[in-house]
Image: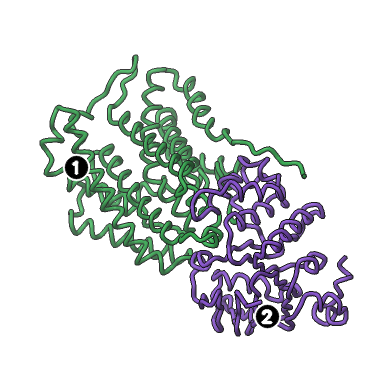
Amino acid sequence: MSALLSLEGVQTHIGQYHILYGVTFEVAQGGVTMLLGRNGAGKTTTLRTIMGLWRASEGSIRFGGQDITGFATPDVARAGIAYVPENMSIFADLTVKENMILAARDGAMDDARLKWIFSFFPALEKFWLTAAGALSGGQKQMLSIARAILEPRRLLLVDEPTKGLAPAIIGSLTECFQELKRQQTTILLVEQNFAMARALGDTVAVMDQGRIVHSGQMAELAEDSALQTRLLGLSLDAHQ
Amino acid sequence: MSALPKAKTDFLPWLLPIVVAAIALPLIGSGSTWVTLTIAGLAMGMMIFLMASGLTLVFGLMDVLNFGHGAFISVGAYVAVAVLAPLTGLVQSPLIGDNLLAILAAIIGAVVVSGGLGWAFERYMVRPVYGQHLKQILITMGGFIVVEQALHAIFGPTQIPLPLPQGFRGSIMLGDSAVEKYRIAAIILGLGVFAVMVTVLTKTKLGLLIRAGVENAEMVEALGYRIRRLFVGVFVAGSGLAGLGGVMWALYREQVTAQMGMEVMVLVFICIIIGGLGSVAGCFIGSVMVALLANYTGFLVPKVALISNILLMVLILLWRPQGLYAVAKRG
C-alpha cells in the first residue's frame, strides 16, 4: 500500500519545550495505523502537529503527495483530514444537531450518511436536540467521532477514543472503526487500549521520548511479547 | 446506554429584572413614578447593551480584553455630531420622518466609521498580541488614549452639544406616567438589535460558528473553518454596534465628549461580567439589571445609586461566579 501521509524528521517545540525530536513514519492508504507509546511519548503532539495546531519547527509532513507542513489548521482540514482530539472538544452549549451541522462543512448533512452513523451511535439520534454538554462521556466521544466521519475524509486522526469509557461504549466505537476499516478509510489511531489496537491495526508506529522507535506490522508486534515489553514497558496481553 | 441528565433551559436569569421591578414598585409607592423609572431604566439598559454586546462577543470568541472599546463609542458619538451638523433642517423639522432620516444617517455614519476603526484596531493593534492579556490591556488602552486625543485635536477639548431631533423631544403620557419619547425609541432599537443578534446566533450557520468559536476556537478551525476571518468580522461588527450605542448615548445625554466612551466603559464591563463573558443573552439581562437598579436606587436612595452596580455585580457573582450565563470553554 502506498503512503497517504508521511512524516519526515518532524520536530516540534511548544514554547521552550522540545517535544518531538525528528518523528518519521508513514500512514498507508486505506489502512489503520496505530500510534502507540507510553504517556508523554509525543503521540498527541504528533497528531496536533499534523493538524497544524502546533507548528513543526523542522521536517516535513506530506499528505497525498502535497507538502502540508506549514498549512494552517483549516487548510489541513480542507485537504481532507478529520481530527478527533483526546478531549473530544464537542461544543457543549450547542445541541447534538448543531454540532453535526458544523461538521457538514460542504453543505447540508447527507441523510443516508447520518442514518449510517446512527446505526453505530443510536444515542445521538435520541438526543439530537439536546445540548451536547448534557451527554455522558461516552456519548460525547460518539459525537466527536460522528462529527469527524459525517463527510467522507481522506484521513481520520483519532486520539485515544476509548480513554475513560465503559466497555459497552468501547464496543460501539470498535464496531464503528471496524466498519470504517472495511470501507478502506485511512485512519491514524492513537490508543492505549491494546486489545482495540490489536483488533484494528494494520501497521504500527511506536513512540518514545518524542521519537519513533519502531515501525512495522501490527500483527508482528502483537505476537512478539518481548518486543512489546521492550517498546511499551509491558506486553499487550497484560492489558487484556 | 447511560442515563442522560435532562438539558434544561435556564430561564432564571430572565426573571431577575422582573423581580427587581416588582420589589421596587411598593418601595417607590407611586405607580406612575415606577413606570417612568422602569422605562428610563429599560432605555438606559438597551443603550448599554448596544455598547456592550460587541465587547462580550469579542472577549468570548477571541479571548481579547479590548480596553479600547470605549473609543468606538466616542467615535460613534462624534460622527453623529459631524453628520447631524449639516442636517439641521431635518433635525429641527417637526416631521418625525425627517428626524428619523437624520438619526438614520448619523447611525449609518457612526457604524461605518466605528466599524472601520475596529478593523484597524484588530489588524494593527490586537492581532500582534493575541493570547497575551497584559499586552492587550496596555495596547488597547493606549489605542483608546490616541483616539481620545485625536478627537480632541479634531473637535476641540470642550463638550459639544448634540440636541435631540424635534420629534423625539418631550414626553407622552402612559396613563398618569410621563415617558420620554426618545427612551421609547431607544427601547425599540435595543430590542430590535437584540432580536437580530439572537436570530443570527441561533438560526444561521454563521451564528453557530460564532457560538462554537466562543467555546473552542481551535476545534472550529480543525473542522475546516477559517476562524480568523470570523474574528475580524465579529470585531468589526462589535465596533460598529459600539458606534451605534455611542450615537444613542450621546443623543440621550444631548452632549458629546471624548471621555464619554471611557466613562461608560465601567458600566459596560460590569454588564458583561454580570452576564457571563461571551454571552449575548447574559449581557442583555446584565445591562437591563444595571440600568433598572441605577434608576430605582437613584430615586429611592441616591447615595446607594453610586455603588448599586458594584453591589449588583458582587451579588450576582456570589450566586453564579461565572456570570448569569456561563459560557462553556473548551468543551
**B25 on left or right of A235:** left
10 Å crowding of disc 1: few (<14), some (14-19), many (20+): some
Q: Quadrant of the C terminus of chain B?
A: bottom right
Q: Quadrant of the N terminus of chain B?
A: top right
**Could you tell me the amino acid type at mark 1?**
Pro
User: Disc 1 on helix, strand or loop?
Assistant: strand
Question: Residue B151: image x %, image y %?
Answer: 23, 56
Query: Chain B's colour?
Result: green
Question: In the image, which disc is placed on residue A210?
Answer: 2
**Could you tell me the amino acid type at mark 2?**
Gly
Question: Residue B116: image x %, image y %?
Answer: 29, 56
Residue in the picture at 40% in, 53% down? B234
10 Å crowding of disc 2: few (<14), some (14-19), many (20+): many
Tell me the subunit letter for badge 1. B
- Is residue A60 placed above or below A142 in the rendered structure? below
Query: Chain A's colour?
Result: purple
Kindly identify which residue carries mark 1.
Answer: B161
**A109 on left or right of B164:** right
Q: Nearer the viewer, residue B34 or B297?
A: B34
Residue in the picture at 13% in, 33% down? B92
User: Disc 2 on helix, strand or loop?
Assistant: loop
Task: For marks 1 and 2, give the one nearer the viewer.
Answer: 2
Q: Quadrant of residue A160?
A: bottom right
Question: Residue B47: image x %, image y %?
Answer: 36, 39
